[in-house]
Image: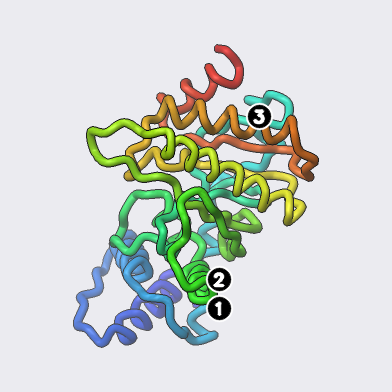
Amino acid sequence: MNREEQLDYLINYLIDERDELIDIPENYQDKRNLLRALMNIRMPCEVSDEFLKIQDDFLTAETLSKDLTSADDIEDVNGKIMLWQGDIVTLKVDAIVNAANSKLLGCFIPMHNCIDNVIHSAAGLQLRQDCDEIMQVQGHDEATGKAKITKAYNLPSKYVIHTVGPAIPQGKKPSKKDCDALKGCYQSCLEIASEYKLKSLAFCGISTGVFNFPQDLAAQIATKTVEEYLKSNETTLKHVIFNVFSQDAYLTYKKLLFGD
């Protein structure tokens, strides 16, 4: 099976599963977008071994075709702390952090550009299934400031640590409780990374997307929490990476970490 044949198989499987009449486009990129959308809206449930094998072959090939970055490739370094601007799903590290919601199942909005959607889309259906198993055992929504770890499947990282940051209503300022919760996110992820004896961990900007936490304040909390943790705790972590996407976020973190 070539890439397009794999893509056709995966799309047709998910459409048949839904028992709906969905037009399949002819253009490869449009078909690729349709596959992502179908994966995004799929509830966690049983899937065939054949589907998973073809999905894994397809997604892993996509991952390997990207320009992957390891901790050794990052130039902005201050001791164990690093700053890197780029796509978090191209980081070849022990774990990346996902800014999740309290259901912990990923984003169900087709093709949404939030990091939760991007990570689940690149990892594959198993990520949502693993999260669902965790939540079924837990029996309640994930608390703000807490975190859970799963395998990363078709991502270049080994694990994904999912954490739920505080959501700030539009037009409101974060309260002390919100700030403490955001600090808890970073602490929970660091503790899990140490528990699993990880050496490299990459943080996204938790709560700074659709959860509306102000970027500057979030960066201050993030950098201070990580610096204090590394200073006060024994840990296997050798590299803690702040991953940013926008130039504004990069400059904010660079000033905090390097004084530039």
Q: Amino acid at mark 2?
A: Asp
Kindly check if marks 3 and 2 are in contact, taking CB atoms under 8 A apart as contact: no
Q: Label 2's element?
A: helix
Seen at 26% across and 33% down, the residue is 172
Seen at 68% across and 24% down, the residue is 78
Which one is in front, 227 or 239? 227
Q: Which residue is mark 3?
A: 227
Q: Which residue is mark 2?
A: 57
Residue neighbourhood size for the residue with mark 2, other residues' Cα within 10 Å, grouped as few (<14), some (14–19), many (≥20)? some
Q: Label 1's element?
A: helix
- Between the C-alphas of marks 3 and 1, the distance is 41 Å
**In the rendered image, which quarter is residue 149 located in?**
bottom right
Which one is in front, 179 or 77? 179
Q: Is residue 247 above or below residue 203?
A: above
Which one is in front, 81 or 154? 81
Q: Is residue 147 left or right of residue 238?
A: left
Q: Amino acid at mark 1?
A: Lys
Query: In the image, residue 61 lies at what x, y percent?
Result: 55, 62
- Badge nearest the viewer, 3 or 2: 3
Which mark is first along the chain, 2 or 3? Answer: 2
The answer to whether one can see residue 126 in this image is no
**In the rendered image, which quarter is residue 44 located in?**
bottom left
- Badge nearest the viewer, 3 or 1: 3
Query: In the image, residue 251 lies at what x, y percent?
Result: 47, 21
Q: Label 3's element?
A: helix
- In what quadrant of the picture does the C terminus appear? top right
Q: Amino acid at mark 3?
A: Glu
**In the rendered image, which quarter is residue 83 located in?**
top right
Query: In the image, residue 80 lies at what x, y percent?
Result: 72, 31
Q: Is residue 154 above or below residue 9?
A: above
- Between the C-alphas of marks 3 and 2, the distance is 39 Å
Q: Which residue is mark 1?
A: 53
